[in-house]
Amino acid sequence: MSAIEASAQSRVEHRAAAAVHPPIFRLAGVTKRFGGVTAVEAVDFDLRRGEVHAQVGENGAGKSTLVKLVGGLYVPDEGRVEVGGEVVQFSSPRDSEAAGIAMIPQELDLFLELSAAENLFVGRRRPRRPWGALDWRQMEARAREQLGALGVEFDVEAPVERLSMANRQIMLIAKALMGDAAAVVMDEPTSSLTEREAARLFRIIDELTARGVGVVYISHRLGEVFMVADRITVLRDGQHVRTAPASELDSEEVVRLMVGRSLDELFSRGGHEAGDVALEVRGLTRTGEFEDIDLTVRHGEVVGIAGLIGAGRTELAQTIFGVRAAERGEVLVDGEPVELDSPAAAMEAGIGYVPEERQSQGLVLPFTIAANISLSILGRLSRLGFVASQRERETADGFAEQLAIRGARVSEPVSRLSGGNQQKVVLAKSLAGGPQVLLLDEPTRGVDVGAKSEIYRLIDRLASEGRAIVLISSELEEVLSMADRVLVMREGRVSAELSREEATQERVIAAATGVAVGEDEGAEGAAPAASVDTER
Amino acid sequence: MSANQLRPLDVLKGVRFTRELVLLCLLIVLVVVLGQMSPVFFTVGNLLNTSRFFVEVGLIALGMTLIIITGGIDLSVGAAMALVAVTVGLAHQSGVPMALALVLGLAVGLAAGLFNGLMITRLDLHPLVVTLGTFALFRGIALGVSGGGAVSSFPQWFEYFGQFYLGPVPGQLFVFIAAVTAVWLLLSRTPFGRYVYAIGNNEEAARFSGVPVRRVKVVLYTGIGVLVSMAAVIYTSRVSTSRADFGAGLELDVISAVVLGGASIYGGSGTIAGTVLGVVIIATLRNGLSLAGVETTWQVFLLGVLLIAAVFVNEFFRRREE
Amino acid sequence: MSGVGALRSVGLRTAPTTRGLRRWLLRPEAPAAVFLVVLLAAFSLAADRFLTPDNLESILVQVAVLGIIALAVNQVILAGEIDISVGSMLGLCAVAVGTVATATGGLLAPLAAGVATGVLAGAVNGLLVTLGRIPSIIVTLGMLYALRGVILLVTGGTWITQIPDETRVLGLAKLAGVSLPVFVMFALFLIVNAVSRNSTWGRDVFAVGGNRRAARLAGLAIDRTRLLAFALVGAFVGIAATIYVGRAGSVQTNAGEGLELQVIAAVVIGGTSIAGGRGSALAPVIGAVLIGVILNGMILVGVPGVWQSAVLGALILLAVTTDALRRRLVGGAA
């Protein structure tokens, strides 16, 4: 019997017990607004003892807002947060932690210069020696113990900045489990884990639920969700759509609830004839990030790149764009070699890039919409060395109309726009230079469904105009529906190249996490990651 | 936020509560008060004469404004000024024609700035650390090569740079006005100026947008080197001497003027108009208080308090607006 | 548990034998320490009088004031802030020490007056930074002016002379053949090192300076941590001022001018990052000693004194360049 089957059985047992107790926590009709934007509206959500309650929804559906309401980072504008039946007011993460709700922190929240052991103890009671000094030996021993319980072992005295991404992720989980939490919130915990590490996490979840701990599980991977979850709550555009036992749902139904319409309506991708080769990448390498990448994209073609976080996709795109220095290899646009030393050179050669981090890499937030759009092409908009503001505004207006940027005039700061419209500004900026090759890195992250479908239509139109498009995305449906061809990256290498017909969820996930495609062909419907090796 | 909910401060929104406006009011108050305290202060001659003393600080402050907007800083300007002055002095003393000596001085100032810029961009070092190092280095070289001695006896025509008057107007005021205009145009009207603000607000996004971040920074630090050279020449001419202890503490006056003028030390905001007002206020304060018989001790004290208070008020209003 | 073995190899990127050396080389003060050893060797070969107990002791006495203040400023820099007001602060504390010393004599009363003055000034810095939310570089720049003004106001521009001998003990006396300032510097180093390593505040300083956002989420008392660091600077400046007055025997109104930059130089040369969060309590001491050795050695090998500042500047640049290159070679955070 595999670990997963065993856990499924044991879960049935304690699920019965869980229903007797009141929920560990409950959100009752919570609403949270930011300025004019409503992030979540009148959402109910509860977590019972010993259950795994999954939250699913598209980017921008309100999952992270809900998590932050539970975690004390946000205070709801309306509605209540209850813990153990009592209404509570969390004003800081400390409050929610004190109430027994542990969040897995983000990678950003690590202290890179401090050791792994110390990171686990920052902000907590640290073991001390009788005379009051901190007891490092005990701290390190307890850190090793905690990590050992998660089945890993590494140098806890070394600064965290020297740890691999996977070990950092496990450390973060360990940190959340340090206290005696009644509930653990896991937001995309497997996004940078390999299959084997993910399997270990699922075993930990079993152990937790067996002890009566409740787990909120948020993931894009429906296969995983169906594997671990007892109940599933679907969110869409900040609204609660449905909560139901996992056994009453299947993945098609969940996707339909998430998107709110059939996939065909959301995605638009006409059939286009691909033209000549537009972008050619040969043997591109940055040791430790990606190695020997070959990639060809034709005019009019959309090539999707799938893979785990940390597989090297973003690094690859940024190297092609000249933000990172290539160690080896070359990039050609329309047969001409590109100088790989600066974004300016890449843009000159006809490459555009929409970065993954909209706010930190895509936009200068205090700048106006127009100034953001024109930032890359100021030279061209200038006359006698001075910026021609008339021409600048006309260009910006043109893009605002073309991309339907709504919510503010181009002379207003870009920070006034909603996420989706901000993303359109980033797109406009990358289009301003008139690129023939467009690298899109998670172009729909954090935007609502409406803006999403507009962005898909735009991608389709750009392709039909003959541009070559590389679409990097962690949302599988997006890649599968939009791409003519899918490359899967794993640990810095291309692990599979699939045509539109060949590319299925199972195959892509298998290639991304390292299970041979051949073994996986028998896998059923939407449980792609279910073929976990059982280790012993 | 709904439009009908008027907060008290919204009423002021119509007046555009800008930093420059506050500074202008402050300057007017200062002038009126000082005028009351000293009859000499309120004469055109004195007001114009004051400008002789702020041109050196003012020129350098123009460059410093741009550097601070990018989130950088340059502590080495006072030392670089001494280095340029000493170069000019020693070159003249060793028989180099004065014109060539000035060119040499300019080259040294430019090289000093270029050195800062390359250290900061090529090695990815913090500007504070690099310019702290060159602060000591430049001053040290100036002291070392001059042996601590002074050079005077410059040719007669050299006095024009710092002692020339057109009617009642000191000559260097024209240089300053020209420089203000040029830097103002550069910052507010050209792609380069836009890049400066972009870098200060979000360096990473600027890089991702193809802004040549390193080149802009190198140009800025080299540029301030050129401004330092100009200031050094004017100062040397004004006092008819060149010495290695010139410009001691100058960096603090310059940074104070820029910050008083509303530039955020964290980068991203600042204007030439604000800096000019900052420079004038500090100069007025120093000059006016002297005339009014207030001891130098109070001037130093007031300058420090004014700096802290100005930034406090600035941050306070910035937070209110958010 | 075959899986654990596989993961272990992921966790450790280098073999255990090279790990110790590698870790040592990654310590912030390693380049400065190596450089210090090289310099000591070079000066010993170049000048006979260099490697004598007397000369080495006199170097340490020379840098005691600098080292003590740098120890505290190091904590401020680790916490992600900066303090450039210490030059004027030393002057003000020296005035306090001198005034009390001429009035009452003794050692404890002047010392207490110096420390109290320093803590007060440091607390003002800290409060303006934390409660006033003004950037520390501005606050301490302003205080650099303001405190110098206060000195002139208090003294009226005159020197304080005729400091009684019993007050000068801290600057001049020897214990077991070693001057008191050296003892004081090392005692304070041991205390700060222990506190930095083994107290909650000491660790919070690193966390607050390394990742402010994460520190806030972890619920650390960010303001209190920074406030304490600024106050500590004041206290140490007060102690240093007593040594300074003891050695000088008088207080001039320009006492401590330019000291702030030397202090930051000592901290940075020692290997603490100006950006905060990275460094150690040992760094400022090594930095200060390095400065002392180089200035002393230069004189012994016959370099004219006017070149001191140039050498100091070159040293700062060399230190930070080494650090930048080291990061590239050994590999820093990806």
Image: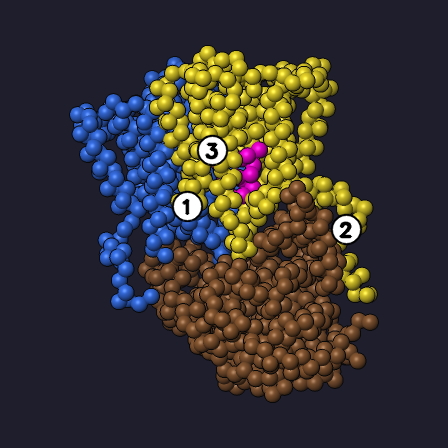
User: Residue A234's x, y, as percent?
Assistant: 53, 80
Residue at x-position 62% and y-position 23%: C182
Element type where label 1 sits in the image: loop
B152 sits left or right of C108 in the view: left
Range of residues picked out in magenta: C71-83
The front one of B102 and A135 is A135
Q: Which residue is mark 3?
A: C119
Residue contact at pointers 2 and 3, CB within 8 angstroms: no
As displayed, is residue C280 above or below residue A260? above
| Amino acid type, label 3 | Val
Q: Residue A39 lies in what quarter of the image?
A: bottom left
Q: Which chain is blue?
A: B
Q: Name the mark on residue B38.
A: none
Q: Which chain is yellow?
A: C
Residue at x-position 38% and y-position 31%: C146
Q: Residue A196 lies in what quarter of the image?
A: bottom right
Badge nearest the viewer, 2 or 1: 1
Magenta span dominant secondary structure: helix
Q: Name the mark on residue C131.
A: 1
Mark 1 chain: C
Q: Name the mark on residue C14.
A: 2
Residue, far bottom: A248
Mark 2 chain: C
User: Residue A450's x, y, as percent?
Assistant: 45, 77
Badge nearest the viewer, 2 or 3: 3
Residue B129 part of the magenta segment = no
Element type where label 2 sits in the image: loop
| Amino acid type, label 2 | Thr
Quarter holding the C terminus of chain B is bottom left
